[in-house]
Amino acid sequence: MRTSINTVFSIFLLLNVISFFGQSKIERKEIVTSKNSKDADSILNLGMKSQDAGNYAQSLLYFDKSLILYNSLGKSRKVGDCYSYKAVTYYYQGDYSNALIFFKKSTEEYKKTKYRKGISSILNNIGGVYYYLGNYLNALNYYKQAIVIQEELNDTKMIAATSQNIGGIYSQVEDYTNALKYYDRSYLIYKKSTDIKAISQNLNASGIVYVKLGNYTKAQKNLNQALVNADKINDKQLKIEVLSSLGELFFRQSNFERALYYYNLSLEYSTKINSLQYISITEVALGKILNKLNKNKQAITKCLKGYNNAEKIGATSVKKDACDCLYNAYKFTKNDKLALYFYEKSINFKDSLKSGETSNKMMNMEFQHQQLLDSISHVRKEHVIETKHKEEVQKKERQQNIIIISLCFIVLIALGLWNRLNYTRKSKIALKIEKDLSDELLLNILPEEIAQELKQKGFVNARNFTLVSVLFSDFKCFTQTAEKMSPQNLVEEINTCFKAFDLITEKYNIEKIKTIGDSYMAAGGIPKPDKESLKNIVLAGLEMQDFMAERKINNDANNNPAFEMRLGIHAGPIVAGIVGVKKFQYDVWGDTVNTASRIESNGIVGKVNISESLYHLIKNEECFRFEYRGSIQAKGKGELKMYFVERNPHILNNLQY
């Protein structure tokens, strides 16, 4: 069952694109050539009108003209406004590469005049573009930069919006604890305002998270309040979204009667405002419920309608859900041929959802190029036929016709060359995006410093480090627990845990080294030494254990198998580098690594076990409390003194994310 991801984010993406300019729109005027501020303002406003009307080509012309005037007047802030409006226009057209380019140019201009509110707004918008592209790490980075400035300016409205955006990211990566943390932060700000719509959107977003966590009481409370507010302001779109969320809530509880009630209401409102997005979503949702009630023929009718509406708007994810619904319905009605047909379509849509947007654009440009070639070929054939005809019926005008044909041919060649150049330019942009994606992928595998060295030299020199902290973790009784799970559920559970660990290591500037089966390895202080790494890696370990504890509570509540984890940390000298020529992996070696592994294997579930040497290095940190375990017999190491470490409840931890 799916609710629209736009519920969380669509309200806030580019929320403040034009909110901070403070310019009133004016009536259209005759554009004059004199270079003064009033003319530039008039042209800018004409561009804004064209943008609102959806005339994007015209709006870009106006923005470029006003940009020239503002540049000549030396008005950097106004130049930044023009760049920002151009970026928004490109975003509306789906040209995300140009949108990012002009948003960043806008930021550079605002920095010249120290226009910090504008800078924070643009950073938020850049984060929104990356969010839409599914690049959550980049989106999170820009949101964090924006919120720092917003807090300095005490811009509570934008702090709330940005916090909700960050909550949306954590919700997408299924880190629901952090998602709720940021949603709650937004709610406290909105609660002090009179913005009922923003409060309702926040309650709906957090309600969806509570549904996913299985906290149905809290979810229903939030969603009911959101619906009351939506009715109060008579916002039909908001009512549609909340009703859809309530349908999902009762579907999860197998209360199909109430789920049908809310989804039917959502469909009714969607039909009134012709919202094809929610019409298709609710029709598919109703089809899935009817399947559960063994009303398979009715389910087929609903899902086919949902599929057709999703086809009209190109909603691939909804089409996939519709195909899943139709597959199950036809399977139960023993129509194996149609069941297989929709199963194969579902697989295709699943693959399509994973395809990169850049690939789609490249294929589209190639298609346009082929159309151009076919068009030129067709015109040439037409001219050949026309020439022969004229030679037969108008011999006296032969020379004149040849001249006309030659001129037309030259025009066609010129047109073909121009289109080829235009295609080449677009291809270069697309290739640049591909290069950026490949660089990003390399940085996702290797530390930035190591990746740069590898690209420059083709190899990486091994390096000695005198003091590096090494963290190991693994799941206790992994084999026995895994036997209770299907292969798919097992992989999903491990992936959920390791994704959370990845975000935690990034938060504390710790380098993930690798995973082996159910084991996770990370190191602090490499490739760049960091005096805070010893403290940070222990904080990271504590947060990992907190996540596993919460995960177990949630899994136990849902009667799902749950893992428990041992975790150990040791510090000392290591050697780090890359080995091999394929499937590069940054790795570390040395006795410190072996000792860290023994510290982990001699740990206890739910605890962070550290070595004596690490204890002496961090024992003066006030945020920790230690418990001496004595000397423990470690395989291959003899007796090792070990300590448990936990947070000091009397000391506030100021490290916040």
Image (spheres, grey):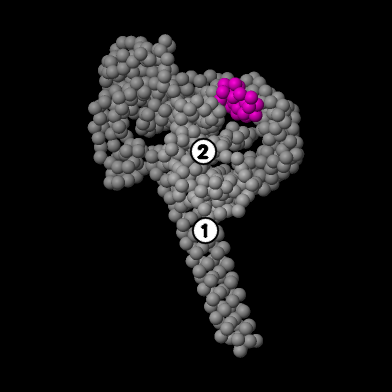
Relative side of 614 to 366, left or right: left
Q: Residue at x 57, y 79 (%)?
A: 404
Residue located beneath label 1 in the image? 366
Reply above or below: 63 against 230: below
Identify the secondary structure beneath mark 2.
helix
Q: Residue at x 46, y 26 (%)?
A: 152
Sooner in the amino-acid sequence: mark 1 or mark 2:
2
Q: Residue at x 57, y 53 (%)?
A: 31
Which quadrant would residue 291 be assigned to in this image? top right
What percent of the width, then of the height, locates residue 448?
35, 38
Give the camera-side residue of 403 and 533: 403
Categorize mark 1 by other alpha carbons within 10 Å: few (<14), some (14-19), many (20+).
some
Give the amino acid type for the residue marked by disc 2 in the picture.
Asn
Give the amino acid type for the residue marked by disc 1 in the picture.
Glu
Identify the secondary structure beneath mark 1.
helix
* Span shown in magenta: 186-211
Relative side of 566 to 304, left or right: left
Circle number at residue 81: none
What percent of the width, then of the height, locates residue 180?
55, 24
What percent of the width, then of the height, locates residue 139?
48, 36
Alpha carbon of mark 1 to alpha carbon of mark 2: how far?
30 Å
Residue 141 is a magenta residue: no
Residue located beneath label 2 in the image? 125
Q: Provide the major secondary structure of the magenta segment.
A: helix
Reply above or below: 451 against 619: below
